[in-house]
Amino acid sequence: MNSNRRTAAIPLYRLLVPAIYILFLMLPIYWLLSMSFKTTNEILGGFSFFPRDFTLENYIEIFTDPTWYRGYLNSITYVVINTVISVTFALPAAYAFSRYRFLGDKHLFFWLLTNRMAPPAVFALPFFQLYAAIDLYDTHIAVALAHCLFNIPLAVWILEGFMSGIPKQLDEMAYVDGYSFPRFFVKIFMPAIASGIGVAAFFCFMYSWVEMLLSKTLTSVAAKSIAATMTRTASTAGYELGLLAAAGALTIIPGAIVIYFVRNYIAKGFSLGRV
């Protein structure tokens, strides 16, 4: 009788723990959404789980003010450019590390990763002076290229792990069948590591999307990112908390969309031990 009760209690325990964990993770997101439908006075006036005076004014201001919605467009523009550049350059580099052994290959691979370990603040001033000198300051490509310093090493590291899982016999069989290297790489090899490309693109996208210091330092007006635009909520009277919450809620959407489309690739990356 006791054994039956224990057996029946196990499924409930297994459901309860993930449910509490998910609730704990979703609580900050719910709170952000709730604040986005409140006025700043209501937020500062007291504690409440739900908006007392529900308002859409915060979202209306974001979608009608060019400074706000251009911030989102600017961020998406340089993030997409960076993701394409990072993955494009990381593919041949990862293939070289995966398939060939050359003098200093391990040291070079480690040096790439050390660039990823450095904080962005170290490179903010050099990038600023360099881009100002060559008239790239306040452009989308400036931020995209700056983020490549961090994203290309990460993409190389991820892709090299996926490529090492593909046997070299695949390359040899393609050459025997008369495939040129570019044709083999595009037609056969890239589809074989499609999940790795998806994982690398996801991490490049997310880093570039949430990075603030370089994007704020290297832009001013024409390519100003949403992260820099959100600082406009500060004034002598304090922060416009409702407007800031609405802007923060909207910044979650692109990342959530990307996660939805690459969720299976990320799971495979975890199973391969590279993510």
Image: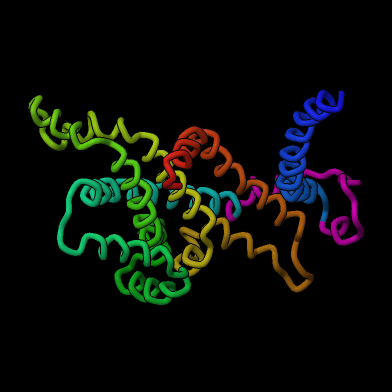
Q: Considering only vertical position in the picture, is 143 above or below 270? A: below
What residue do we see at 38% from left, 48% from top? 158
Q: Considering only vertical position in the picture, is 196 above or below 227? A: above
Q: Is residue 174 magenta?
A: no
Expressed as whole percent of the image width and height from the top left, the position of residue 146 reads 38, 63
Residue toward you, 147 or 171: 171
Q: Is residue 68 visible?
A: yes
Expressed as whole percent of the image width and height from the top left, the position of residue 62 reads 66, 49
What residue do we see at 75% from left, 61% from top? 240
Residue 188 located left or right of residue 258: left
Expressed as whole percent of the image width and height from the top left, the position of residue 32 reads 74, 50
Expressed as whole percent of the image width and height from the top left, the position of residue 180 reads 10, 33
Q: Please, which colouring scheme is shown?
A: rainbow
What residue do we see at 46% from left, 47% from top? 275
Q: Considering only vertical position in the picture, is 143 above or below 205? A: below
Residue 54 located left or right of residue 131: right
Extent of the magenta region: 40-67
Q: Considering only vertical position in the picture, is 14 above or below 40? A: above
Residue toward you, 86 or 223: 86
Work out which quarter of the rendered image holds the N terminus and state it: top right
